[in-house]
Image (tube, rainbow, N blue to C red):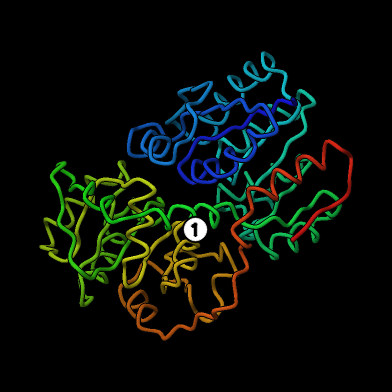
Amino acid sequence: MRKICTVVGARPQFIKLAVVSRVLRKDFQEVLIHTGQHYDYNMSDVFFKEMDIPEPDYNLGVSGGTHGQMTGRMIIQLEEVLLQERPDMLLVFGDTNSTMAGALAAVKLGIPICHVEAGNRLGTLKNPEEANRVVTDRIAALHLVCTPSGVEFLNREGVFSSVHLVGDPMYDAFCYYSARLDGTELRKITNLDGQPVTLPERFYYMTSHRQENTDQDEKLDQIFQAMEALDLPTVYPVHPRNQARAARLCREQGYRKILLTLPVGYRTSISLVNRSEKIVTDSGGLQREAFFARKPCVTIYDYVSWPETMAGRCNQLAKPEKEDILAKLNTPVSFSPSYQPFGDGHAAEKTVDAIKRFFEGKGNVSE
């Protein structure tokens, strides 16, 4: 049985891992390496527990510091693990520092790299994750792509034969876990003091964690002003590094419609997506999940992350400005019942099939 080392470090990767690992382990020996990029219970451990993900074989405990410091420490430790394990392939997801660090460590050792969620592009290196995507795709041996736009981006960069359109593992996860929710997961939501929160019957769901939106009072307060002006309350699970600022702004400005909570696990987040009226986010994952659930979404970001979600104005970009956010939230949207560009819910199976075909030396596979 061939050995595959899988590197993860952040919560979006845990979601994809949950569905891919379940299928991968039927045919391969998987060695799971957690870099530690997301490290506390609400950002990491709860995902492994809720989604029945196997315990990592290695937890490197690398978190904090600048992008360069974090990536450098990861490469050093990942190289040591890979030298010890001698895998037949390295599997990485998405676009985090963990992704690029794993790829760089592997390529130096002659280990082929499989990149899940390959080909996604914003079109600017001003975004740190874009650099991670480009570097990883440049040195990967196998490119597993979520959507047609990813195939197009890779083709423009001269990558053809190793490209496999398999669909989005996040859609797999959304379908699988949505069918297993019963509402009890919402009872786990607590405020920033750890006290239980009673959700209103109708609400908006918001996440905002990007530094460009949350590291300045002015921008975050503009987002809060927009949410405070809405007709319903907003549930906002707050990233640990932003909790003090968010709590202070709500206190100083007297906001009453913004329910600040501790970060939530995947099942709870999916339940919030499915039960919310509309979604406001700056997360690449949540804007896709809003699309999966057919919920109107406003993404507070400068770049289109997933072009497919923009059809029918189902997902719209907004600046971190009150009036722009409100205008986009009030814009009519149109979901097409037949349009699902993220696959058929079987991306994990197609991912593993592509890996098998890679080792067999066979040609391209696609949906």
In the rendered image, residue 124, in percent from the top left (x then y), is placed at 62, 57
Which residue lies most toward the bottom here?
Answer: 332
Q: In this view, does 263 lie to the left or right of 154?
A: left
- Residue matched to label 1: 175
Query: In the picture shown, does residue 103 fall above or below 331?
Result: above
In the rendered image, residue 183, in percent from the top left (x then y), is placed at 28, 56
Q: In this view, does 138 lie to the left or right of 40?
A: right
Q: Mark 1: few, some, or many residues within 10 Å (few <14, many ≥20)?
A: some
In the rendered image, residue 346, in percent from the top left (x then y), is placed at 63, 55
Q: In this view, does 195 lie to the left or right of 332?
A: left
Query: In the picture shown, does residue 58 fall above or below 198?
Result: above
Residues 301 and 262: in front is 262
Q: Is residue 358 left or right of residue 86?
A: right
Kind of element beneath mark 1: helix
Residues 228 and 273: in front is 273
Type of residue at label 1? Answer: Cys
State the image quarter where residue 165 is shown.
Answer: bottom right
Q: Say which quadrant the N terminus sits in.
A: top right
In the rendered image, residue 4, in percent from the top left (x then y), is placed at 68, 29
Residues 75 and 345: in front is 345
State the image quarter where residue 48 is shown.
Answer: top left
Q: Say which quadrant the C terminus sits in.
A: bottom right
Query: In the picture shown, does residue 72 fall above or below 152?
Result: above
* x 32%, y 60%: residue: 272
* x 49%, y 53%: residue: 176
